[in-house]
Image (cartoon, rainbow, N blue to C red):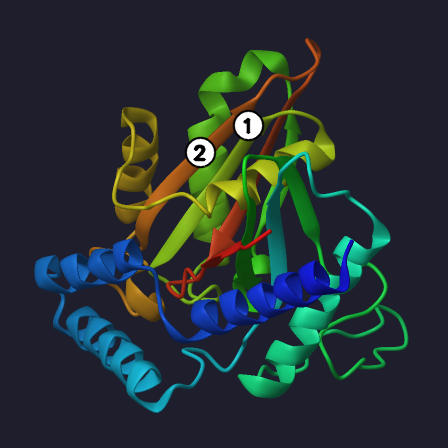
């Protein structure tokens, strides 16, 4: 990788991270506004009004929407002309270090045993980077906070249990309760392998949430009957949306993963000039 491309990629990662931390995607903000307009519970209406005011404050003050700025999960599409080498990963880490200092981000990355904090949101195993072939070099950053991540689950179901998937998804949300800061967005990964299902569930959180197919809408409606509501104080909207991604799996397997995202469903995207 040339030094020029390294610099462009690092800058793009830093900019995409900043965008994700300060500005919610239009479809997510619209979903929150729709929920506020439709809410019948006065306490829930107040909580949604607080969330929308918080969004305005973040924009006007140019500060992160949430104090938990998360662990940046990075998705790249890479054209054939860009080699996938160690420098590619180094440029991504450099971009995260820059964003940590400039946005700024809370340093969230620690050694899992000693709990030593790297101080810059990088470290062994970070960043999680998902690479797909594409026509352009495109960076998507998904900051993932711990409150919602900790409530996510995976289950290796029997192939005959496809009808039980909705119950599993709703049970995961019920067990999570208020802890992931609802109204949430629910990513569901069905199929693949043990690790693949989790990756599918997280990728589902990158999808626009203003469109759901019939299966996703049915899951969302079932979740919203739970009455958990905004910040767990009751109300009509526990989930803003459910997004499902599927992958072929072993004939003897049915992995299902649920990756919960709080109302702050962030994503930042940048194209990198080659």
> Percent x, y for residue 79?
63, 37
Question: What residue did someone put label 2 on?
Answer: 244
Q: Earlier in the sequence, mark 2 or mark 1?
A: 1
Instruction: Specify the farthest residue to the top.
Output: 251
Element under disc 2: strand
Q: Is residue 26 above or below residue 96?
A: above
Secondary-structure class at tag 1:
strand
> Is 206 rendered above or below residue 230?
above
Residue 168 image point, x, y percent: 50, 35
Q: In this orientation, does residue 191 appear?
A: yes
**Around disc 2, counting alpha carbons within 10 Å, would you say few (fewer than 14), some (14 to 19), or many (20 or more)?**
many
Q: Residue drawn at (65%, 79%), measured in percent from left and top? A: 98
Question: Outermost residue toward the bottom?
Answer: 61
Horizontal arrangement in the rendering, residue 172 relative to residue 197 (left or right):
left
Q: In the rendered structure, are the residues bearing label 2 and label 1 in contact, judged by CB atoms less than 8 Å apart?
A: yes
Tell me how many marks there are. 2
Residue depicted at x 30% and y 38%: 222
The reply, left or right, for residue 147 in relation to residue 262 is right
Please give the name of the residue rendered at 40% of the width and 39% of the height, measured from the top-left corner: 243
- Using residue 231 as the reference point, say whether residue 195 is left or right of it: right
Q: Badge 1 is on which residue?
A: 190
Residue 104 in the image: state x and y as whole percent: 56, 86
Judge by depth and name the residue closer to the eye, 161 or 269. Answer: 269
The crowd level at tag 1 (other Cα within 10 Å; few <14, some 14-19, many 20+) is: many
The numbered mark at residue 5 is: none
Task: Please name the residue shown 63% across and 40% down the image.
Answer: 199
Question: Visible in this render: residue 126?
Answer: no
Q: Position of residue 174 (x, y in %)?
A: 44, 50
């Amino acid at each position: 990788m040339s030094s020029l491309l390294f610099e462009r990629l690092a800058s793009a990662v830093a900019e995409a991270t900043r965008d994700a931390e300060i500005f919610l995607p239009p479809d997510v903000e619209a979903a929150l506004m729709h929920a506020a307009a439709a809410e019948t519970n006065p306490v829930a209406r107040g909580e949604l009004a607080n969330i929308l005011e918080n969004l305005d404050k973040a924009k006007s003050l140019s500060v992160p929407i949430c104090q938990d700025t998360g662990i940046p999960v990075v998705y790249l599409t890479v054209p054939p002309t860009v080699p996938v080498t160690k420098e590619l990963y180094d440029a991504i880490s450099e971009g995260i270090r820059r964003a940590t200092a400039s946005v700024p981000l809370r340093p969230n990355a620690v050694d899992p045993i000693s709990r030593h904090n790297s101080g810059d949101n990088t470290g062994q195993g970070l960043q999680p980077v998902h690479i797909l072939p594409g026509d352009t070099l495109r960076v998507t950053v998904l900051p993932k906070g711990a409150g919602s991540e900790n409530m996510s689950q995976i289950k290796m179901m029997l192939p005959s249990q496809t009808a039980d998937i909705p119950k599993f998804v709703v049970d995961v949300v019920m067990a999570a309760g208020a802890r992931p800061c609802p109204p949430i967005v629910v990513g569901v990964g069905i199929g693949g392998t043990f690790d693949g299902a989790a990756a599918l569930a997280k990728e589902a959180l990158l999808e626009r949430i203003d469109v759901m197919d019939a299966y996703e809408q049915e899951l969302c409606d079932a979740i919203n009957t739970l009455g958990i509501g905004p910040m767990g104080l009751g109300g009509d909207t526990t989930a803003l949306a459910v997004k499902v991604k599927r992958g072929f799996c072993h004939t003897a397997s049915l992995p299902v993963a649920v990756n919960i995202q709080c109302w702050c469903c962030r994503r930042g995207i940048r194209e990198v000039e080659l």
